[in-house]
Image: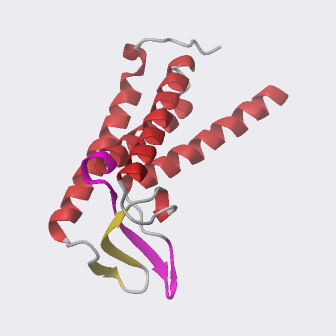
Amino acid sequence: MLSVGRTLTDRWPYVTAAGLVLGLDRWSKSVVQAALEPGVERVVVAGFFDLVHFQNTGVAFGLFSGGQSMGRVVVLSGLAVAASVVVVVYSMRSPAADRLLQYALALILGGALGNLYDRVRLGHVVDFLYFHAGAYYWPAFNAADASISIGAALLLAVVVRDEIRARS
């Protein structure tokens, strides 16, 4: 049986992981902002991968983007704060020894905080990874988006694992 352990000391590896994600996200976005003007695209692997500097006013992968407005920034920032609080509460109420769950939550939290930082500071999120196959493009994204996506996939794996355990 896993113990819940509600102290931050029990979770230092996960807090560190979230901090590393946030640091990687901030660093990578600052490099892109220094190297590329907004809208500029640099081919890295022809026909497959480009670095870009997009200013995303929506959410992950450009969803719900449109013009820049303070209302949009406030609403999306509020949602990011609420999601971060939910992740922290869920983490604190879950067993610290459940490493897969805790790292999944850490990835989600670090990514959410990275994009929140951009949204509050800049009014948009910096996206820069742009994959495509010929004329088919995946929406541009950043390290925070990738972290959130990986964390969500790991969280799904935890749910499936726990369901299998419950049926055994």
Looking at the image, which residue is at 25% across and 72% down? Answer: 38
Relative image position of residue 140 (x, y in whole percent): 42, 68
Place of residue 151 in the rendered image (x, y in percent of width and height, measured from the top left): 51, 44
* 105 vs 38: above or below: above
Instruction: Specify whether 57 is left or right of 30.
Output: right
Foreground residue, 134 or 80? 80
Q: From the viewer's perspective, is residue 97 above or below residue 125?
A: above
Q: Nearer the viewer, residue 161 or 70?
A: 70
Q: Which of the image's four quarters has the C terminus? A: top right
Horizontally, residue 84 falls left or right of residue 43, namely: right
Q: Which residues are magenta?
A: 119-138
Taking the magenta stretch, the answer to whether it contains residue 104 is no
Give the image location of residue 157, x and y in percent: 64, 42
Does 126 appear in magenta?
yes
Name which residue lies at 39% across and 16% down. 8
Q: Residue at the left extreme?
A: 34
Q: Is residue 53 left or right of residue 78?
A: left
Q: Let me know if residue 168 appears in the view.
A: no
Which residue occupies the extreme right position in the image? 167
> Taking 160 as reference, is 48 above or below it?
below
